[in-house]
Image (cartoon, rainbow, N blue to C red):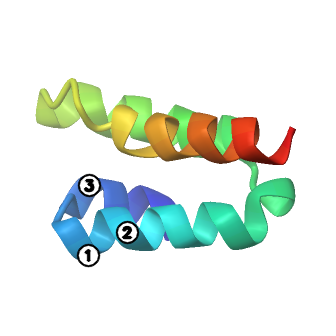
Amino acid sequence: LIVHKAVAGRPQDLRDIEGVIARRHSALDVAYIRRWLTEFADILADSELLQRFERPWRRIQTFNA
């Protein structure tokens, strides 16, 4: 879900990514998400794609630390 939302990149999708991370952060397969976002970023030539996940991930990880 996170990968699809990041590719779409609409404002609601970005809020949804934050919500999923906030609720399910400990259950997420972060390596899997990063791998696929990197693949799609290369294919779509979208350097921002991975950051759509990384920014909320870092923010929530810091908050939960």
Q: Residues within 10 Å of mark 2 (few under 14, many from 20)?
A: some
Horizontal relation, residue 62 to residue 56: left or right: right
What is the C-alpha distance between the residues marked 2 and 1? 5 Å
Residue position for label 1 = 12
Q: Is residue 25 above or below residue 31?
A: below
Residue position for label 2 = 15
Residue at left 46%, top 37%?
55
In the rendered image, the quadrant that contains the C terminus is top right
Contact flag, marks 1 and 3 (Cβ < 8 Å): no
What is the C-alpha distance between the residues marked 1 and 3? 12 Å
Which of the 4 image quarters holds residue 23?
Answer: bottom right
Residue at left 84%, top 61%?
27
Contact flag, marks 2 and 1 (Cβ < 8 Å): yes
> What amino acid type is highlighted by mark number 3?
Val
Position in image of residue 10 (x %, y %) = 16, 66
Residue position for label 3 = 7
Contact flag, marks 2 and 3 (Cβ < 8 Å): no
Residue at left 65%, top 43%?
32
- Earlier sequence position, callout 1 versus callout 3: 3
Residue furthest out toward the front: 63
Number of marks in the rendered image: 3
